[in-house]
Amino acid sequence: MQKVRITVKKITRYDDLIKEYENPMEHACAMQVGQVFIANGWEKPAGFCDSAWDSVSPFVMALAHGAEDFYDGWMKNPRSAMISCNDGFRPVSFLLETLEEPAE
């Protein structure tokens, strides 16, 4: 199984939606742009958001097992994916990249 690097690329915040619909939260998201995590298959990296893991883990698992070219050429690097978490108030975009060639 290959390791997958997860890099926080962008954090968006929709204050209008938060004000209108969300109950107050003190620590809704602790991610920071540029933060890097290394995943080993289904093992969630330490410190990675549970909700974000629910969104990215199927792609991490696929990449870890050698999947490439999601959606027929969507990404310039076929061994990568750009996935956002499912937080509709402050979505975080993650770049997932396979780190190793498969062992033979």
Image (cartoon, rainbow, N blue to C red):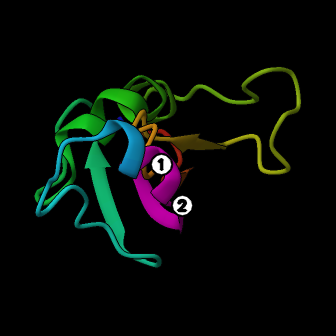
The vertical placement of 36 against 81, above or below, is below
Residue drawn at point x = 46 percent, y = 76 percent: 33
Report the disc number at residue 91.
1
Type of amino acid at the residue the image marks with label 1:
Pro
In the foreground, 2 or 102: 2
Q: Is residue 82 left or right of residue 29?
A: right
Label count reads 2
The picture places residue 4, in percent across and down from the top left corner, at 42, 49
Report the disc number at residue 12.
2
The picture places residue 67, in percent across and down from the top left corner, at 59, 25
Q: Is residue 1 left or right of residue 74?
A: left
Type of amino acid at the residue the image marks with label 2:
Thr
Q: Is residue 1 magenta?
A: no
Q: Secondary structure at mark 1?
A: loop
Residue 28 in which image quadrant: bottom left
Residue neighbourhood size for the residue with mark 2, other residues' Cα within 10 Å, grouped as few (<14), some (14–19), many (≥20): few
Residue neighbourhood size for the residue with mark 1, other residues' Cα within 10 Å, grouped as few (<14), some (14–19), many (≥20): some
Residue 99: tell me if it is visible.
Answer: no
Chain part drawn in magenta: 2-18
The reply to whether the C-beta atoms of the residues labelled 1 and 2 are less than 8 Å apart is yes
Q: Is residue 84 left or right of residue 51?
A: right
Residue drawn at point x = 19 percent, y = 42 percent: 23
The picture places residue 98, in percent across and down from the top left corner, at 53, 49
Image quarter of the N terminus: top left
CA gap, disc 1 and disc 2: 5 Å
The picture places residue 18, in percent across and down from the top left corner, at 38, 49
Residue drawn at point x = 11 percent, y = 63 percent: 26
The vertical placement of 32 against 21, above or below, is below
Q: Is residue 11 magenta?
A: yes
